[in-house]
Image (cartoon, helix red, strand yellow):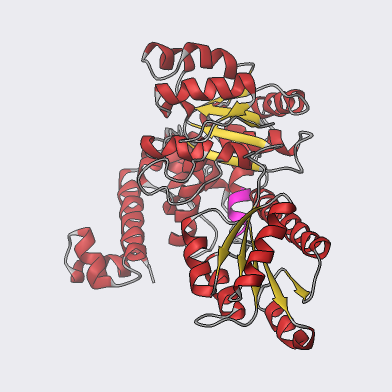
Amino acid sequence: MSDSTKYILAVDDEPSMLRLLEISLRQAGYQPLTAKDGREALDVINTQKVDCVVTDLHMPRMDGLQLLKEVRKNDTELPVIIVTAQGEISSAIDAMKNGASDYILRPFDLTELELAIKRALSFSRLVVENRFLREDKAVGTGLIGNSPAMQHLAESIRQVAPEKATVLVAGDTGTGKELVARAIHAASPRSNALFVAVNCAAIPHEMLESELFGHEKGAFTGAVKERVGKFELADGGTLFLDEVTEMPMQLQAKLLRALQENVIERLGGNRPIAVDIRVVAATNRNPRDAIKDGKLREDLYYRLNVFRIDLPALKARKSDIELLATHFLAKRRVEISAQAVQVLMQYDWPGNVRELENVLERAAIISGNRQIQPQHLPAEMLNSTSEFMVATALGHDADTAEAKHNPLCLPNAVEQLERQLIAQALAQTNGNKSKAAKVLEISERSLWYKLSQYGIS
């Protein structure tokens, strides 16, 4: 049976009608499944692959409308076609309001039934694609910056996007490898198809093969129904394999074969399934080191490394920090002071852009969604600044003679640190001063004194 075979579930309590539907579906090229009422139909749906349901409206135990409602609780995309009599149009309309894909009236011929199923299957595919495309649009490319490093990255994306070549994106954690993959997809001829992402490090090794290639019913314990993998889902589009060096070596061999032959086999299956996808792989390791460490097959590396993109760390493009900060804070409608930006510029950002986004979100919370000042930033950032930046972070005017002549004023530094720790403790305890005092390991009386001393409300 070909991989394109569609499984249609016919539900009717009349044996003769059920037999007629079964024969008609088989003649139309579908694989028929049958159930004599709604409850039996739910058992079928929960245990094996079903692409479309054709159900009678009136049945014992559970009728067609109840079946439709139960299906919609767990699956909003499975097409359900209602079969009803001429005098029950109002019931059919109620079914449509509750999520039925279509309805047909008895008596009907094979052509009418076939057209209804084709419409339902086509619509279901569009729903899935539109959902993925909306998610892609909502995420956007997110590539922000005009530094030389980002200009070079944009040029690389422009060069490779129209091609079919496999792309390997290498970069530290938090540099935006998935964003680059999405940007390549968005600028490619495949942009109207799906972008499907798989994090190879986040999925248990024993489940990753099924996630990528799908599985047949009974392929392993718990495989109660057929499942389509990410390769098939991405057919015609782009498959992004994040942290590919975390994939088990024997699975890397299967991936290599799929890339070379554009054919996959589901787990537990033996029939080839042709796929047309563009693969973008990513790793936070040095690929050559990963090969030496036995984390990456050398032949797979050469197959993936047709076009290489190395992402710059944030510390290598610090001129983009202010632009990134403005972008991340825009959704909160929060501004950031020039002094705070200078503190950010002096930090090395081991967590890269992801760390910057998290730091700014935390700072916005501590500031009460007011303008972010240096004291709202983590202590380690203030401690890592230069002498000039220490003076700036203390709230002094960098242009004043005092700041220039005494940039490391110790009393002011102590006050600044105490202010920041108190603000963090209050934010952590939602303003509860008794709990904040316990976090700071001081008495509540001492905390009240500090609040009064520093004018903190």
In this view, 150 is above or below 452:
above
Q: Is residue 343 visible?
A: no
Q: Position of residue 40 (x, y in %)?
A: 49, 69
Residue 62 placement, left or right of 58: left
Predominant secondary structure, magenta span: helix
Residue 374 placement, left or right of 52: left
Q: Position of residue 318 (x, y in %)?
A: 57, 32
Quarter of the picture holding the C terminus: bottom left
The quarter of the picture where residue 18 lies is bottom right
In the image shown, does 106 or 370 lie closer to the viewer? 106
- Does residue 207 show up magenta in the picture? no
Per the rendered image, the range of residues in magenta is 326-331
Q: Position of residue 37 (x, y in %)?
A: 54, 74
Q: Is residue 326 visible?
A: yes
Q: Residue at x 43, y 51 (%)?
A: 224
Q: Position of residue 179 (x, y in %)?
A: 61, 38
Farthest front residue in view: 16
